[in-house]
Image (tube, rainbow, N blue to C red):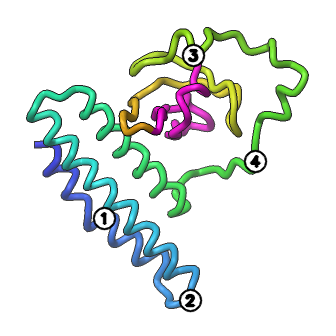
Amino acid sequence: EYPNQLRSYVPVFTAYTDSAFPTDIPTDKGLRVALRYEVGRFFASLERFRQATNRKAIDEAYIAYSDMSLHFDRYLRVGGLYTFYDDNVTLEPYYAGNENSLVYADPKKDPALVRDLIVLIQGPEKGKTGIVIGLYMDGSDACAVKLDRTKGIREIRVVPRSWAAK
């Protein structure tokens, strides 16, 4: 039932993409391609989600949901639909010399699992908190994290599991 309801939004995505970036200048063309790509990936993930739920494959459903969330988040970002722009390239300098200000379990000894609350301990969003929504079992050792609300928005990130600590 839900896949069909979500698929009904394709005309909305298409209408926005074509009306927001209507010209033939290279930037508009490039943005239309990028947005259509993210919509395609979103709906491919939706189909994987539908199949996983039919098979009752919970881990596959988590990954498909994570990918749906990631591609929707990217569509919003590329399409300029977020209500703010965070111009911080990285938060790591704020923690330089203050590494002990973050308290967490060693992610190598006690790795975060789906539904665990985490803090990012490395990378450009070091110090941000969120929840693990999917673990990639493709050999990448990555996880999908839904960050806590910032300025009204919960962004999705795919990070190495070693960066997500409980």
Number of other residues with Cα within 10 Å of mark 3, as a class: few under 14, some 14 to 19, many 20 or more: few
**Which image quadrant for residue 119?**
top right
Q: Quadrant of the N terminus?
A: top left
Q: Alpha carbon of mark 4 to alpha carbon of mark 2: how far?
A: 28 Å
Instruction: Report x, y in % for residue 72.
Output: 40, 51
Q: Which residue is mark 2?
A: 25
Q: Residue at x 43, y 46 (%)?
A: 70
Is tag 4's residue or tag 2's residue first in the polypeptide sequence?
A: 2
Residue lying furthest bottom in this view? 24
Could you tell which of marks 3 and 4 lies nearer the N-terminus? 4
* Neighbourhood count class around disc 1 (C-alpha, 10 Å): few under 14, some 14–19, many 20 upward: few
Residue range corresponding to the magenta coloring: 140-166
Residue kind at label 2, given as amino acid type: Ile
The residue sitting at 46% across, 49% down in the picture is 73
Question: Which corner quadrant holds the C terminus?
Answer: top right
How far apart marks 1 and 3 lie (CA) works out to: 43 Å
The label number, if any, that marks residue 89 in the structure image: 4
In the rendered image, which residue does mark 3 sit on? 108
The residue that disc 1 covers is: 12
Q: Earlier in the sequence, mark 2 or mark 3?
A: 2
Specify whether 93 is left or right of 33: right
Give amino acid for label 3. Answer: Lys
Total marks placed: 4
